[in-house]
Image (cartoon, rainbow, N blue to C red):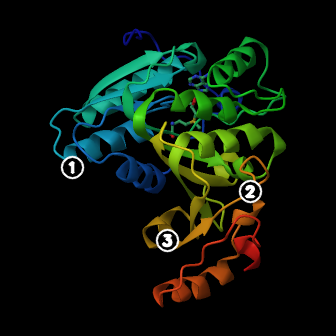
Amino acid sequence: MFDSSAPAAVDTAELRKARGAFFTPDSITRYITNWAIRTSEDSVLEPSAGDAAFLVQAVRRLQEVGASVPRVDGVEIHPHSARVAHARVKEAGGNPNLIVSDFFLVEPEPRYSVVIGNPPYIRYQDFTGESRTRSRAAALKAGVALTALASSWAAFTIHSALFLKPGGRMGLVLPAELLSVNYAAAVRQFLFDRFRSVELVLFTEQVFPEAEADVVLLLAEGFDEGPTDHATIYQAQDAEALSTLSGPLTWTPLDPAAKWTGVLVDPDAIEPLRSLKASGHSPTSKPGATPPSEW
Ligand SMILES: C[S@@+](CC[C@H](N)C(=O)[O-])C[C@H]1O[C@@H](n2cnc3c(N)ncnc32)[C@H](O)[C@@H]1O
């Protein structure tokens, strides 16, 4: 826990960049939270809570489905952000349970039905020392060997999943490199192996200029009920367009660990596919078939 009376530490753009602190727009936190939280009984963890962009939405959503003063749990490495998060959750009518810690030092226990968030994206050049060693050890606990080239989000994704109860749901904002870089092969394989269902929302425009990264939304459901052999893909122009998604398309990779560049659907291609689906034809690719971008 943290000392709520401690003075605010100095924070700068450089320090925020070093710890991957870019905060998520409301339209995205709302979309992920509404997808992930389904009943007032859902137990929620945010592994890199920042100033509670997700946790405040979680309180709103839990109240919407019938909870009165919902407890929400979070971990955050930056004490001042955790203090702000604590205050914001309280203000929203929730019961905050925030731990100030490196998330990789928190021993995973499968106690949550929902894990949501936007993990830090710290590239391997800046993600060094004990922090990286700890992150790789955490991923290894899940049987996932990450290379030294992995950015912080990769181990965060794996470690986050280990906090889910069987059947749990994980909704994360991840860099689009999840789909394509070699070091993420082990993450892609993990998702297909361990979850019953994997959905991705892709954007045709940049939604997160501050983070200098293209992002995708990962909506993975049914932890420990995998494997699955396909991902369901939706597409939106930008965060504001999340209410009018295109899709879905089903994508079945021959090898989940291989690059998922086949899921990068041309926006002009999706409308005819939607009409086709509406007319009763389901555009489902088969193992080894041409990827959707070339349909
Ligand atoms: C991309 S920001 C997202 C914050 C918040 N989840 C949101 O969506 O607005 C990532 C957050 O992770 C925190 N962070 C970075 N490394 C961490 C670590 N090892 N353990 C816990 N939190 C960490 C940063 O301080 C920052 O607040």
Q: Which of marks 1 and 2 is in front?
A: 2
Please tell me whether mark 3 sits on a helix, a strand or a loop.
Answer: loop
Q: Which residue is drawn at 64% across and 53% down?
A: 215
Q: Check the picture and name the quadrant holding the C terminus.
A: bottom right
Q: What residue type is labelled 3?
A: Leu
Q: Which of marks 2 and 3 is in front?
A: 2
Classify 1 as above or below 165. above
Residue beneath the point at 70% across and 73% down: 292
Disc sitting over residue 245 in the figure: 3
> Is any part of residue 208 visible from this angle?
no
Where does the N terminus fall, quadrant-wise? top left
**Residue 206 position by quadrant:** bottom right
Residue 194: give x, y in percent of width and height.
Answer: 56, 39
Direction from residue 88 to residue 230 in the image, left or right: right
Q: How crowded is mark 2: few (under 14 residues within 10 Å), some or many (20 or more)?
A: many
> In the image, residue 18 lies at what x, y percent?
71, 28
Query: Could you tell me the amino acid type at mark 2?
Result: Trp
Front-most of residues 84 and 189: 189
Q: Residues within 10 Å of mark 3 (few under 14, many from 20)?
A: some
Question: Can the viewer see residue 249 in this picture?
Answer: yes
Question: Alpha-carbon distance for marks 1 and 3?
Answer: 23 Å
Quadrant of residue 238 in the image?
Answer: bottom right
Q: Mark 2 points at which residue?
A: 260
The kind of secondary structure element at disc 1 is helix
Q: How much space separates mark 1 and mark 2, taking CA atoms?
A: 36 Å
Residue type, mark 1 in image: Glu
Residue occupied by mark 1 = 64
Q: Quadrant of ligand 1?
A: top right
Position of residue 182 in the picture relative to residue 165 (left or right): right
Q: Residue at x 61, y 31 (%)?
A: 158
Mark 2, secondary structure of its residue: loop
Picture coordinates of residue 188 (x, y %)?
Answer: 68, 45
